[in-house]
Structures are given as C-alpha cells and as structure tokens.
Image (cartoon, rainbow, N blue to C red):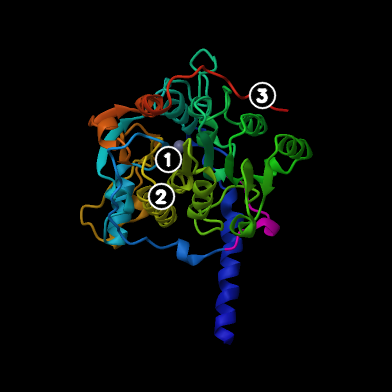
Amino acid sequence: MKSRILSIIAVLLMLCLFFTGCEKENTNQTDIVSTPATEETLPKVETDNLSFVPYTEYNLEEDVEVKNIILMIGDGMGENIIENAEIIKGDSLAMRAMPHKCYVTTDSLDGTTDSAAASTAMSCGVKTHNQSIGVDENNERVETIIEFAKARGLKTGLVDTQIIPHATPAGMVAHTDYRGIFNVILKHMINAKVDVLYGGGSEYTDTAKMQQRIEKNGYTYIKTADELYESQLETPVIGAFNWGGMYAGGLPSLTDMTASALELLDNENGFFLMVEESYIDITEADLDMDGTIKEMQTFDKCIDYTLSWAEKHPGTLVIVTADHETGGVLVPEVKTPENVTNDLFTSNGEHTSTNVPLFAAGAKAGELFSEEIIDNTDISKIMRQALNDTYGEAEVVFLNENGQ
Ligand SMILES: [Zn+2]
C-alpha cells in the first residue's frame, strides 16, 4: 500500500515537471506557442491513453454520397514517423486500415510551409505565404472550408490538442495574414458560430471580453474533462480544457473530444469536422522521439475510434493526412524498437518539404482519391467537389465579421 502511494506521488511529481516543461517552444517556421499549464487546470492523466490501440480492419461503405467529412491532421506527421511508430508497436497503425492512400505536396509560396499556409491550402484551396490564415498572396480573404460547409447547411467542428485558435484550426475558418493574433482568430471562430470548438487555450477564452462574446453568440462554455463527459451538451459549445495546449496523456484525450464532437455534430444534413493532433510536430521539433511516439499513439487511437464511428454512419468520408513533415525523420536500417532513437531526426527540428501521406476511407473515398500524388490545395478542391455533389452550390459568405 505504502509503495503504491509512493508511486502515485512519483507519477504526480513527474507530471508536474512534464507540464511545467511545456514552455519550450518550437520556433521553426514559427509553429509557435505552447503554453504551460497552470496547476488548477492540469488535466487528469489516464495512462491508458499512452498505449497503441490494437490494429482493427473496418468496413466503411464507399458507394454512397458524401454526407459528412472528417479531416484528421497529424501536425508534422511524415511517412517515416508512422513507420517508426509501427516498429515500436510491432504492428500496423490503425490508419493503415484505410484502403486508399496517396502522397501530398505541401510547399507554400515561401518554400517549406508552416502550419498556417498548409492549413489555408487544405481549407481554402489556395497557396499562400507562411503565417497566413484564410487569405491569399494578396492578403485577400478566400472562402474557408467551414464557410463553404456552413453555406450548405452542414454543422461544423474543430477539435485540437493545441489552443483552439492555433494555426491549423485557424486556417479552417479565420482570415488574417498573421497567425499569432490568437484573440482575433478566436473572435473569428466564435463569430462564425463553429458548432463545436474543443482544445486548449483558456488563456484566451477566459478573458472578460471573450466571455461576453461567447455568451452573446449562445455558446455553452466548458473547461473540464468531467463537464465534457457528464454534461448534456448542445451546440454551439466551446471547451477549453487547459490554459495552454495539451500533450499526450492529458484528459480529456483527443479521442474523448472527438467522440463528443461526433455525437453533437451528427445530424440529417451532415457535418464537417477537423481533428488535429498538434504535438507530433512539437515533440519532433524538440528532437524527442519518445514524446513523438506518445503523440502518435494518441492520434492513432483517435483515428481508430473515428473509423469505428464512420463504419456505423454510412456517408462519412474520413481523411487522415499531415500539414507537412517535421524533423527530416529517418527509419533505422535495422528495424527494431531500440533503434528508434532521437538520432533519427535530421533537420534540426525544422519542417521539411517531403511529401506527406494521405489515407482515405468511407464515402466515395476511392473515387475522390484516385491519384498517386496530389497537392495540399487539392484536398480542399476534393472536399468541396464532394459536398457540392451532395448539397449543391451556394454563395460565398465570409463569417468572420458576423455575430456580436
Ligand atoms: Zn504544422
């Protein structure tokens, strides 16, 4: 008993150290801002989240029109980090069960992309400058995928392990030429009435001004894992579960947030949901292979859950990809777990221009993703084509200035 208490204390101590260590920032291509947790909002930790989910085959119907799209992004997830995770696991990752695969070119107008320009490309279908969110090279607003989906009557959601207004979720809905103005980006997200906004970043949601905006726009605001698990939630809902972002192991997990979002978004007229595991990139930039593998476990578990959900909800298209590769990750010559080390990072933590993999499953997946190599802007075009085929054309309406 005594040793059990001691080991619990040891784990708690390690967690404190772990979260206070989150201040280290990844500044390459300005994938900035990972903020430390304060003690009062420290998420509970469920160590079950830090294991690989067993590999399962799912049978998602393809011959049905696209009603829902779930776009899942592993920030910085190149092919080789997937393979390294599989060496550690000793089996295929869940995403390999997705029957269609291609590769994606990711460069922005400035060469190697940052997460902002990559998200803009996938969301809006245009190449832009690094740091830019939902604007083109001339700083003109371009229609985001959430604006596109909402114009067709779909519900929308953004789920992230990073702070809610971070670059990748931002590119799905906001418009600014500078990704770092988080208060403005969060304002855009709330004004656009994205139905579900889950992630970290209570630093930004808790301010008096933002609370006013959240309330005026009719949002339910939650801050704890228990509120997510136990409340009878309705949309629109915003959940900021930590002061900063959330590393693997924190609660609610990415899967918890995604499960809640799917439950809330599922409706007759479909939905678009983006889910991002953001800390793959950050741990790669820190040259931390163990940390990266934990983030891969978190992401793959969420993919497995999403595939099982989509199997039961025909008309759902699931896309898994990355915004760019990070770390110039190599695969060891002798593929054993002990060879998966920090030495496999070769780009000094920088993003690279290496093509990233894309996996697709579900409604029309084979038809829509039939090319071997596509550009990241094609992801936007393909999603729009699929939604137009189902829901028809609609006028462009920019949503960032709507609302109160
Ligand atoms: Zn990124």
CA distance for labels 3 and 1? 25 Å
Residue 371 horizontal/vertical position (percent): 23, 29
Q: Residues within 10 Å of mark 3 (few under 14, many from 20)?
A: few
Give left or right: position of 65 versus 400: left
Residue 12 horizontal/vertical position (percent): 60, 68
Q: Earlier in the sequence, mark 3 or mark 2?
A: 2
CA distance for labels 1 and 2? 8 Å
Is residue 26 at least partly visible in the picture?
yes
Within 8 Å of ligand 1, the CB of disc 2? no
Res 106 → quadrant: top left
Q: In the image, ligand 1 is in what quadrant?
A: top left
Q: Residue at x 55, y 82 (%)?
A: 4
Judge by depth and name the residue closer to the eye, 89 or 216.
Answer: 216
**105 versus 397 height, above or below:** below
Q: Are marks 3 and 2 in contact (CB under 8 Å)?
A: no
Q: Residues within 10 Å of mark 1 (few under 14, many from 20)?
A: many
Q: Earlier in the sequence, mark 3 or mark 1?
A: 1
Dot label at residue 306: 2
Res 372 → quadrant: top left
User: Residue tagged by mark 1?
Assistant: 70
User: Residue tagged by mark 3?
Assistant: 402
Please state, as top left, top right, bottom left or bottom right, where the C terminus lies in the image. Answer: top right
Label 1, secondary structure: give it: strand
Label 3, secondary structure: give it: loop
What residue range appears in magenta? Answer: 34-44
